[in-house]
Amino acid sequence: MTYQQLKNSFLEYFEKQGHKVIGSASLIPDNDPTVLFTTAGMHPLVPYLMGEKHALGKRLASCQKCIRTSDIDEVGDGTHHTFFEMLGNWSLGDYFKKETIKFSWEFLTQVLKLDKDRIAISIFGGNSDVIDYDSESEKYWLELGLNKDRIAKVSENWWGPAGLSGPCGPDTEMFYWTGQDQAPKIFDPEDKKWVEIWNDVLMEYNKIAEGKFEKLKQKNVDTGMGLERTLAVLNNYDDNYLTELFQPIIKKIEDLSGKKYASDKKIFRIIADHIRSAVFIMGDPKGVGPSNKDQGYVLRRLIRRAIRYGKNLEIKNNFCLELAKIIIEKYKADYPELEKNQIFITTELEKEENKFQATLEKGLREFYKQKNIDGKIAFLLFSTYGFPLEMTEELAKENNIKINKTDFEAEFQKHQELSRTASVGMFKGGLVDDNYNTKRHHSAAHLLLEALRRVLGPHVEQKGSNINQERIRFDFSHNEKMSDEQKKQVEDIVNEQIKKALPVNCEEMPLAKAKEVGATGVFEHKYGDKVKVYSMGKSSSISSEIPFSREICGGPHVDNTKELISFKITKEESSSAGVRRIKAILGKNN
Ligand code: SER
């Protein structure tokens, strides 16, 4: 069975069972500041699992792009990836255990025609005093003909929430025997030849912020099938990298390195996996380029780790781009955003590879001179040679070089303090003389950011600003030229807020609180600190009314938006790859 056939047959099967198929959401979650990436198909559906009505009804199915950075150390075996696709079906307060177990069994054995003798099941084993073992699911599996020996009770069979709080519940997982021999009679979930391919979460609970569990308004089902793993077992592979999804990439690495996959499997897999993730992160509709913060930092780690392993294979020239092209080609029919963002992907990737190739060798020489890695060296490797911290740690482990972790972290803490002071200084510099007009332009920049997000979408983030007495210059993430209509809409929104004469309020709060109330702003280098949050619109964070704009910012600002008089965009142009620049002015106030 091919990749396309598997995907189609899953979605068609669930359509026949009354499900509506929805498209994959962005890899970068919309409303969850506690995680960087979408980690499961249920992630974009959280509001509906909590009880909100979905426009398409109570039965949904999808194939969702996912990134799990927590699995990065496992990548290198045959079944783990940082990026993967998840097939899933959902019941939003509709069917529950009996039906989902039946659907799963029917799909695996009748549609995919997987060998029943190679399937095993785990169910929630209970956690002594709180919730009992899931005898109901066990009963349904037995009724379908599963042998009792092939059903294991596992107390860890509990899934979620995806972030720090949200819907979760016990789950029942399906495994397939990938050994060449007959599957053992008794299922041992610890045996790695049993590969988990599907997980049905029986979602009855909501974990709230204080860590407590409460019953959800409705009983849901949330399932997730690993597409790469299922494709592998359907083709009798015990290694996902042997499937059509990875073979072209693996072959290209063989060509470029002159080495064979069979002799360096782990390295080939890491390179293929990481570049595939990088392509999907940059090519996402809300895609980002490499940077030193958040998703951009994860992306940088992935690319640089792949490049470092490329060195181990003695690949002479840049290679990431060659692999990226193959990946875009393979996936562009299903994910047209990859083709649309091809220039952004290739430009960013090439820039990053050039940058890192220029320092990697020297950095490695510096590294190999050391007997111990202390904070100062790790910091030098980071700041001068661009080694992400995790890479230095990994290199040290591989070479049995001792690493002083406490010292290491202290040095970074110090660096964060330094860069914070530096950025505050820079910001102050931006506001030159605290001139009243400069202050007005600064407040207008806040309204502008929020207006851009409303018109162009929540992917818009501030990328820089330069504000003086004359004008506002504002850089933000967005891939396309703005249309005249969009510019007009943005101007109208800002002018409307000026007309409304909104009060401007400043509050100090811990960073976590600022995130919780949905303030936008640069979160890096500020951990554990109190930050200032400026709101334009209704007053404070305790008020239930949501202000028009809420940003983490050093200030200063005007007291009321009416002081801005009127707002006009004078120019909209490209600033750099994926970043646009707006220049704007305000009506005179005198
Ligand atoms: N959310 C569950 C998982 O990720 C099922 O989709 O395994």
Image: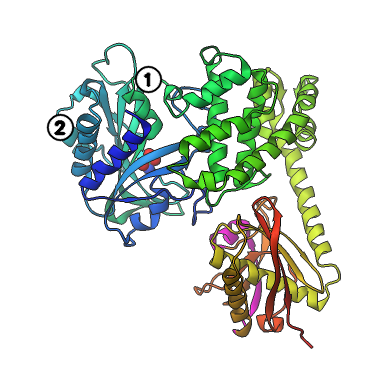
Instruction: Give me the residue at 54% from left, 61% from top.
Output: 457
Q: Which residues are magenta?
A: 500-518
100 in relation to 484, above or below: above
Q: CA distance from mark 1 to mark 2?
A: 27 Å
- Secondary structure under the numbered disc 1 in the rendered image: loop
Give neighbour class at mark 1: few <14, some 14-19, many 20+ (Cα, 10 Å): some
The answer to whether one can see residue 36 in this image is no
Q: For residue 555, which numbered disc appears in the image?
A: none
Amino acid type assigned to the residue bearing label 1 in the image: Tyr
Residue nearer the viewer, 207 or 19? 19
Residue 56 seen in the current view: yes
Q: Quadrant of the C terminus?
A: bottom right
| Residue at position x 17%, y 36% in the image | 140
Q: Using a 10 Å C-alpha cutoff, classify the residue at mark 2 as few (fewer than 14 neighbours), some (14 to 19) or many (20 or more).
A: few
Residue 144's disc is: 2
* In magenta segment, residue 513: yes
Which circle marks residue 237 in the picture? 1
- Counting from the top left corner in percent of width and height, residue 542 is at 54, 71
Report the side of 334 relative to 519 (left or right). left
Report the mark closest to the observer, 1 or 2: 1
Q: Earlier in the sequence, mark 1 or mark 2?
A: 2
Identify the image quadrant of the N terminus.
top left
